[in-house]
Amino acid sequence: MLAVYNSATICAHREPLRCGLRLDPDLTLIMARSRDWDELQYVWLEWRRRSGFKIRDLFDQLVDLSNVAAKYNNLTSFADYWMFPYETPDFRLQLETAWEEVRPLYEQLHAYVRRKLRDFYGPDKISRQAPLPAHILGNMWAQSWSNILDITIPYPGKNFLDVGPQMAAQGYTPAAMFRLAEEFYTSMNMSAMPAEFWSHSVLEEPPARVVVCQPSAWDFCNRKDFRIKMCTHVNMNDLVTAHHEMGHIQYFMEYKNLPKIYRDGANPGLHEAVGEAISLSVATPRHLQALGLVQTAVDDLPHNINFLFALALDKLPFLPFSLALDKWRWDVFQKRKTKDQYNCHYWFLRERYSGIKPPFLRSEFDFDPGAKFHVPANIPYIK
């Protein structure tokens, strides 16, 4: 499945001779920057046709094999295997309760964004009450809406939070971004990265070979070799991600002298919680100003609202997305949904939690969950 996903490419919209466009960076940039409704529809559909569509039968085999593995570990399904580390019998109920606390705020954001997109694309494209089309939200999976900030920002002309151009002007490189992240941690009296980190990590996409660009942190379990793999671009989003990934490395190094069984977090969500807390700190206007990436101090209502709104576009849509994706997989592993219901149930959950709909009519010949890396990689997302 990963071989299919990692090798998937498409041809350009209305340019059948310009082919070989990969998810990262080509399609990611199109989804982020294009405002052409038809082009976004085309890219959205073609990526799913070249990735998820091809792994449907393989995924069904994975479900059966994973459940066999779970039963060897005295668990009833692979969903229980994934939830087991949280040591919480009512884990699903707790997630629903947590989501209900956030949902009213998300619904306000959803309604506001729908109005802005309706003004931009026209009422013939977007209804006042229908779910949002998934292809126009600035991200291949609509898991973050940050890239449509320019269309939806409450106070146009007052936004100063995209420090990417300033980073480029100051000559930042991917390595410099990770050095900056290292300084963030050492300023809190945490450890500098060991020499092996700088010599063995992959911080840019290698020119001679194709790699999976999903950012990840690695502990090689020999107490000295810790690495990050990330196809880093000089922009604000990747600057924040660099700090997040290095947070994992900091935890690996804190655990390094413990027996292997104790080198993981207390549960799979702990690392992510720490990483997100760090990300929130890094992205504040005050911190960016301290780094010299924001040139003028601005502390007034329009700028503060824009900052909080930009944060909401990134963080809030991600919650119902990740909840729907893993609830879908739990239902599949627990055989609550069979193969002939996979795609329908996926979109049922996406609409229920996110208020998102596909731009085209989908069927059970399609397998849209498989177009997201964590499904072919079989990596849980709820953390």
Image (cartoon, rainbow, N blue to C red):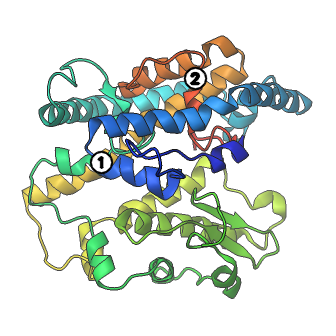
Left or right: 185, with 60 as reference point: left
Q: Do the residues labelled 1 and 2 touch (CB within 8 Å)?
A: no
Q: Where is residue 117 in the image (x, y as percent from the top left)?
A: 19, 35
Q: Is the N terminus in the top left, top right, bottom left or bottom right quadrant?
A: top right
Residue located beneath label 2 in the image: 366
Q: In the rendered view, does 79 fall on the left or right side of 68?
A: left
The front one of 102 and 340 is 340
Q: Which residue is drawn at 37% across and 33% down?
A: 41
The residue drawn where x is 21% and y is 29% is 111
Numbered label attached to residue 34: 1
Q: Give the CA distance from mark 1 to mark 2.
A: 25 Å
Mark 2, other Cα within 10 Å: few <14 / some 14–19 / many ≥20: some
Pinpoint residue 195: horizontal percent, then vertical percent: 67, 87
Residue pictured at 51% horizontal, 59% vertical: 274
Q: Nearer the viewer, residue 323 or 28?
A: 28
- At label 1, which amino acid type do we have? Ser
